[in-house]
Image (tube, rainbow, N blue to C red):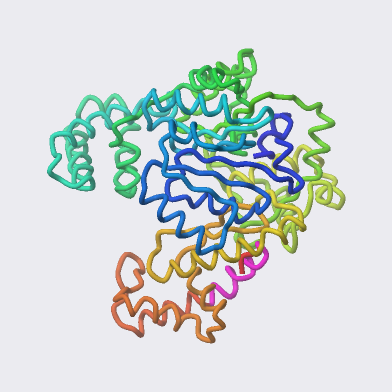
Amino acid sequence: MNLNLLAQQVQPVPALSNGRPFAFAELGCGHGLTATMIAAAYPQAQVYATDFNPAHIVGATRLAEKAGLKNIHLYEHSFAEFLNSDLPDFDVVSLHGVYSWISDENRKLIRDFLYAKLKPGGLCYISYNTLPGWSTAAPMRKLMIEMGAGEMGKSMPGRIDSALDFLGKLKDANAGFFRSNPAAAARLEGMGKHSRNYLAHEYMNRDWTLFYHCDVARELAEAKLVFAASAHPGDHVDVVNLTPDQQLLVAGVTDPGLRETVRDFCVSQQFRRDIFVKGLLRLAAQEQAAALSSMRFALTVPRAALGLKATFPVGEVNLQPEVYEPVADALKDKPKSVAELLAAEPLQSLGYQKVQQALLILTSTGQISPVQEDKQMREAKPGCDRLNLAIMEYARYSSDITYLVSPLTGSGVPVDRFVQLMLLARRQNQKDMAGFVWSVLASQGQRIVKDGKALETPEDNMSELRLREQEFIEKSLPLLTYLGIA
C-alpha cells in the first residue's frame, strides 16, 4: 500500500513501516485467507476480521489454529455487530469485494465504522464495480437475475447456465442489444469461462450497485476519508493508461473526484481498487524520492521467465529490454533498495524516473514486489512456515487454496496444488517427490488432467509427475527459496 501512496506523493501510513505494531481490520473477510496471511507475515500486527457466513469463520478459525496464530481475531458478525464490539482503533481497514455487493444500509454501517474506528492517518482499501466499464454487461446481468428468479427450483449453477445459454441464443438471433454493443458478445464469451461461484457472486447477488468514483468519494467523505491513490501500481504510469490527448484532458480537471471519474471514462474502468486515507498529507518531491529510495524490491518470478509484454488500457505494451532486463538482473540474487539499484550501472545511467516507472510496471504485472526488511522477514518466517504447512497439508485433499505466504514480500504468492504437495514432500524428507504426489492422488481416485484429458494409467500419471518434479526443482524451488517459502 505504501508504494501506491508514495507514487502519488502521499505520506505513507507510519505504522506500516519499520516493523511497528499496527491494527488491521477486514470487513467481509470471506474464507479469511488474506487475514490469516497478514497475521502470519506481520506478527507485530493485531488482525481483526469478520464475515456474516458462519462456515467461512469456522474454516478460517481452523486454519489459524493449525498455524498457531495468536494475533488474529475472527468474528461471525454483521457490520452492525462488529461496529458495536469491543475493538481497538485501526491503522488499516480493508473492504475487498464488498461495497458493491451489499445494501445501502450496510454501506452506511461501513462508513460509520470508518468514522469511529479508523485512526487519523489510517488508510482504507476499498474495491468496487465501476461505471462506465460495466455499462455493457449490466443489462445482461439484469436478464440473468430475472431469469434466475423464475427457476428457483434449479441449483445456482443450473440457473446461471440457463441464463448464459439464453443470452447466447439472443446473440445468435442478432438481437439489437448485441448489434449496438459489439463488446457485449466478447463479454458473454468471457463469462462462460468463469467459475460458477464467481458468476453467482458477481451477477446473481441480490444487492449489486455500480458506482462512479466521484460518488464513492462523496460517500466516504462522510467518514472523513479522502481519496489518496489507486491500489494498483500500474495505474500510476500514465503512458500505459492514457493517450497523450487523454492525459491533457485528465490533467485539466481540477476536482480530484471528477478527475478520477474522467480517467475511468478514458480507460472504460469496470473495477476500482482505491486507497482512501483519514488525513491526507502531501510530500515534497524530495521527501517522496527519499522514501522510495529506501524501499526494497524482489523478483517474484524466475529471472528467465521475465515477461516483456503486458496489456494495459492503451493496448499491448512492449517493455524496453534495455530498462527492464537490467532491473531483473539486479534483483536476481537478492532484494535491493531503489538506492542500491541506482548506485550501479547500467541503471545509474537510466536515471531515477525510468527505474521508478519500471518498478511500478513490474509490480503491477506481478513480476516483482516490495519486500520487508531482513529483521521483519526473520520475525515473520516462523508464522509463515506454520501457515504454509497447514495449507500444504490441506492440499492433500483440495486444490482450493492456490497461494502460500512469503515472509519476504509479506503477501500471498501463487502456488498450485502440485507444487504445494512437492513442497510438503520435501518438508517430510520424502526421497521421491513425484511418487509422494501420486500416492496422494491415487488414494483419492484422482488423475492428472493434461490438455483437457485425464491421464488414465499410473504410468502416464507418473511420467507427467516426473516432468513436473523436474520443473519444480529447476524453476519453482529456487524462486520459493528466494521468497522464504521453501
Residue 450 coordinates in the image, percent (x, y): 36, 69
Relative to 454, residue 336 above or below: above
* Residue found at x 43% / y 31%: 80
476 part of magenta stretch: yes
Image side of residue 255 versus residue 390, left or right: right
Image side of residue 96 versus residue 247, left or right: left
* Residue found at x 86% / y 52%: 344
Q: Quadrant of residue 41?
A: bottom right
Residue 260 coordinates in the image, percent (x, y): 56, 22
Q: Quadrant of residue 17?
A: top right
SS majority, magenta: helix
Residue extending farthest to the right is 343
Residue 109 coordinates in the image, percent (x, y): 45, 26
Residue 14 coordinates in the image, percent (x, y): 74, 37
Question: In the rendered structure, which segment of residues is drawn in magenta?
Answer: 470-483
* Residue found at x 69% / y 29%: 121
Image side of residue 435 versus residue 125, left or right: left
Q: Quadrant of the C terminus?
A: bottom right
Tell which of 263 and 97 is nearer to you: 97
Tell which of 25 and 342 is nearer to you: 25
Number of numbered markers:
0
438 part of magenta stretch: no
Relative to 424, residue 145 above or below: above
